[in-house]
């Protein structure tokens, strides 16, 4: 029989051996990830003197319930936390992503070599991809849920060549060039959201150097408001419309230097320039030009009076967007607002407005011609356009005998040019900053 002291040591050793796997299991559990859907509430029992820790309180919210706490999944994201049961990583997903993660986890359990986790809010597959059909099953599941995932598993050498071929086909179908410098399930970075979504639902992830942010190209927009002889207008290919019309100038001369071309017509007595502003904007931004004025309308409120200014005349909103191969996507909104004295209230004229818009894909330097702006305002005679007559620029048009005799028409030319395309003398003639800043209305 062993002495009591030796017997105690023996039982302590046995107890230590029995408890060792449990401690290792607890240590493993302390590092376990927990995935919760957004808005869910988890009740966790805690010891009285437990020290609570939350890394990111924007993601997790805790409500003390005494012997337990309520953990609320407050917003998307990840956070470490310790509620007395060890340090854990919590991942909060949207309900749709969470449902996809659940189904994916169940499916991956049947796939030898793969494990499922979470990375940056997306399900991620690690381990080794042993069979192509496993990847196909995951892709089918991702398509059904319309969710992206990340494939980080290493292809088995037996299927590695097949994986490379499939990825190459996917990249080519998305308009990207495959690269040997990228990993098995990686694609070169692109600024196309559609391409990124297409590839991410097949487990591919963007890699390589970050895209360089290119500064938006400046665009010069020449605008010419002119009175043009209808006969010469027909000869130049501009048919007199009965309503608003916008078209690309069919004559090559107007697609070169717009102002010089019209100067020649003006010298021949075939037209008259009413305004010719040069506007400057960046690709994707709007440039505005108003051939008109503003009328003050008195407003009355409780204890205060004011004046509300309303614009009237012809207002152009021009938005050029530089595309590839020297192309410009041009959006033009033209608004004609005239004072309607017949419907005035308390001697305050009503404002009749007609808004039209056009869209063109043209080469830089081409000219778009707008005509029929005034005729497109139905039921308004020259007398009805009395408000427009008082505008210095359009007033000159209405004073024209040729216009009153229907021998001329109002035409607006718009010519966008990407500044990098300007060469030689034309580039030297660029207006300075003060000229490029359009006023509220032209005097």
Image: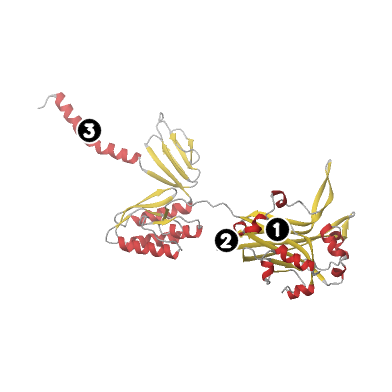
x, y percent for residue 155: 31, 57
Based on the displayed image, in which of its 4 quarters is residue 20 positioned? top left
Based on the displayed image, in which of its 4 quarters is residue 318 positioned? bottom right
- Residue 355 left/right relative to 118: right
Circle 3: element type: helix
Furthest residue toward right: 347
- Residue 166 left/right relative to 244: left
Furthest residue toward front: 425
Task: Judge by depth and name the residue closer to the eye, 27 or 416.
Answer: 416
Q: How far apart are marks 3 and 2 (CA)?
A: 73 Å
Crowding at mark 3 (Cα within 10 Å: few <14, some 14-19, many 20+): few
Disc 1 vs disc 3: Cβ atoms closer than 8 Å? no
Number of the front mark, 2 or 1:
2
Number of the front mark, 1 or 3:
1
- Residue 420 left/right relative to 6: right
Residue matched to label 3: 16
* First of labels 1, 3 by sequence position: 3
Circle 1: element type: strand
x, y percent for residue 17: 21, 35
Number of the front mark, 3 or 2:
2
Disc 2 vs disc 1: Cβ atoms closer than 8 Å? no
Residue matched to label 2: 323
Look at 48% across and 60% down and name the residue there: 195
Q: Which mark is residue 317?
A: 1
Circle 2: element type: loop
Look at 50% across and 60% down and name the residue there: 194
Q: How far apart are marks 2 and 1 (CA)?
A: 19 Å
């Amino acid at each position: 029989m062993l002495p009591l002291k030796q017997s105690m040591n023996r039982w302590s050793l046995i107890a230590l051996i029995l408890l060792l796997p449990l401690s290792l299991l607890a240590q493993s559990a302390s590092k376990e990830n927990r995935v919760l859907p957004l808005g869910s509430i988890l009740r966790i029992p805690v010891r009285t003197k437990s020290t609570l820790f939350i890394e990111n309180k924007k993601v997790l919210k805790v409500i003390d319930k005494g012997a337990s706490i309520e953990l609320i999944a407050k917003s998307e994201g990840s956070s470490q936390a310790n509620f007395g049961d060890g340090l854990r990583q919590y991942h909060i997903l949207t309900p749709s992503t969470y449902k996809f993660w659940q189904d994916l986890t169940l499916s991956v359990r049947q796939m030898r070599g793969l494990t499922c986790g979470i990375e940056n809010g997306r399900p991620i597959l690690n381990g080794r991809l042993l069979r192509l059909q496993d990847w196909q099953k995951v892709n089918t599941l991702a398509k059904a849920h319309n969710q992206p995932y990340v494939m980080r598993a290493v292809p088995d050498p037996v299927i590695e060549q097949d994986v490379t071929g499939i990825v190459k086909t996917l990249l080519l179908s998305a308009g990207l060039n495959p690269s040997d410098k990228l990993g098995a399930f990686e694609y070169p970075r692109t600024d196309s959201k559609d391409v990124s979504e297409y590839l991410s639902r097949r487990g591919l992830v963007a890699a390589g150097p970050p895209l360089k942010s290119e500064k938006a190209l400046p665009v010069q927009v020449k605008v010419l408001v002119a009175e043009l002889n209808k006969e010469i207008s027909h000869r130049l290919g501009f048919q007199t419309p009965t309503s608003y019309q916008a078209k690309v100038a069919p004559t090559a001369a107007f697609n070169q230097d717009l102002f010089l071309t019209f100067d020649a017509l003006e010298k021949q007595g075939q037209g008259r320039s009413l305004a010719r502003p040069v506007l400057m904007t960046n690709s994707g931004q709007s440039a505005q030009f108003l051939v008109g004025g503003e009328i003050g309308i008195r407003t009355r409120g409780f204890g205060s009076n004011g004046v509300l200014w309303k614009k009237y005349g012809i207002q152009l909103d021009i938005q050029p967007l530089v595309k590839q191969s020297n192309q410009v996507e041009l959006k033009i909104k033209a608004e004609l607002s005239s004072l309607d004295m017949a419907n005035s209230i308390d001697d305050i004229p009503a404002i009749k407005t007609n808004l039209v818009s056009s869209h063109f894909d043209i080469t830089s330097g081409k000219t778009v011609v707008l005509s029929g702006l005034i005729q497109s305002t139905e039921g308004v005679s020259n007398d009805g356009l009395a408000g427009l007559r008082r505008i210095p620029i359009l007033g000159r048009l209405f004073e024209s005998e040729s216009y009153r005799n229907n021998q001329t028409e109002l035409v607006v030319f718009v010519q966008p040019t990407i500044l990098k395309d300007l060469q030689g003398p034309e580039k030297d003639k660029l207006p300075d900053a003060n000229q490029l800043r359009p006023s509220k209305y032209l005097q």
